[in-house]
Amino acid sequence: MSKDSAPAAQETDQEPDLPVAHSETPSLGALFLAFARMSLAGFGGVLVFARQAIVDQHRWMTADEFNETFALCHFLPGPNIVNLSMVFGARLRGIAGGVAAFTGLLLPPTLIMMVLAIIYARFGDVDVLRRSLAGISCAAVGLLIAVVFRMMTPLLKRVDVAALILMLGVFAAIGVLRLPLQEVLLVAIPVSIGVTFLVRRKVAA
Amino acid sequence: MNNQNPIWALISTFGLMSLFAVGGAAAAVPEMHRIAVDVHHWMSEKQFADAYAIAQLSPGPNVLIVTLIGYTVAGIPGALAATLAMCLPTALLAYYVSRLLSRPSRSRWPSLIQAALVPLSIGLMAASALILAQSTDRSIAALLLTATVAVIAAVSRVNPLWLLLAGGLLGFAGIVQ
């Protein structure tokens, strides 16, 4: 999860234009298989595996191209890695390539998830499974807290007061007051963009 | 939309939600919880926490918690409908936007918008953690387990899968109730 949401902008600075030769354009089947493989390897976030396969293993994109594509998918709504599969596949093979990568990414894990859903519906009340799932849930929440902490660290280090206030505001509105997401975001996004714009202009001046 | 067939309710709910899901799947969890547990009563608090745990434990993008919600509502057709509704519209949007901006990094607006969204997605993820913790951490032992995993995952690079499995073993042994 942390990997799916990691800011890509910082990575761009560290990796200058590496002139990596592109390998030849993959077939639709190869795209499907490559995305199915990275999806099934991706426990707790697919991004790391996607990057490794696309940039290092198959050399379908340079590191910079990958970062640009990911940055685009990160600021658009929706699951980032799913967006990435469509955009990436479409860059190589048009819309059919996009659909092949999208299907490869989603079909195998969705089938696994449906099997798990059937098992859960039938045996979810069995005591042993109940207890194990309770333990896994606790650990999963712990992982989420760790991700939040890691993402917060740069804001704390910079003492970015505006960002921290916005963060707390969204946390309180959604987590404590349980307000609907749409309404909170319709207020928070323009405010945050405005604040970021003003802060950057002040820094530049 | 409430008294129509459940498949349509799933499609419209998750299709709309995905368009507001900035910051990825983890940030959308509070909204999924609000819709599935509080608004439509598709799932109990406990079922939702279990679905989150299962989605974390299995491979693939974490957004597939919607597959489990969809299955609970309307079986296999529901699982497929929820998954596609959550994933396809934004993927097509990303496709069209990427064609419009063939050079996404030229303008400074993408980077500005991205920077502006970072605190919001952290706030959303923190809210997810709070909402899930309220349904899972109902004992001191459970709270301790969550806190321990949080610290270990924050300071080390242990594969998260091991931490999940350790939590499962402790639960299996009856230590976390």
Image: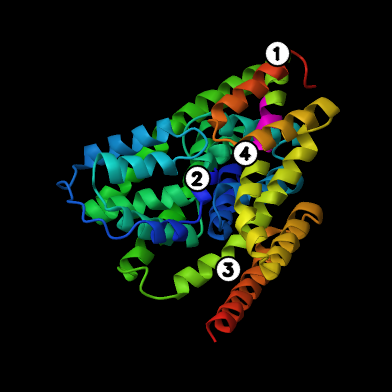
**Tags 3 and 4 both on a single chain:** yes
Q: How far apart are labels 4 and 1 at the CA level? A: 31 Å
Q: Nearer the viewer, mark 4 or mark 2?
A: 4
Q: How far apart are labels 2 and 1 at the CA level? A: 32 Å
Q: Amino acid at mark 4?
A: Val
Chain for disc number 2: A
- Location of residue B148 by image quarter: top right
Could you tell me which quadrant the C terminus of chain B lies in? top right
The residue pinned by badge 2 equals A3
Q: How far apart are labels 3 and 1 at the CA level? A: 45 Å
**Tags 4 and 1 both on a single chain:** no
SS at badge 1 = helix
* Mark 2 crowdedness (10 Å alpha carbons): few <14, some 14-19, many ≥20: some
Q: Residue at the spot x=63%, y=40% of the render?
A: B154
Q: Amino acid at mark 3?
A: Ala
Q: Is residue A192 left or right of residue A18?
A: right
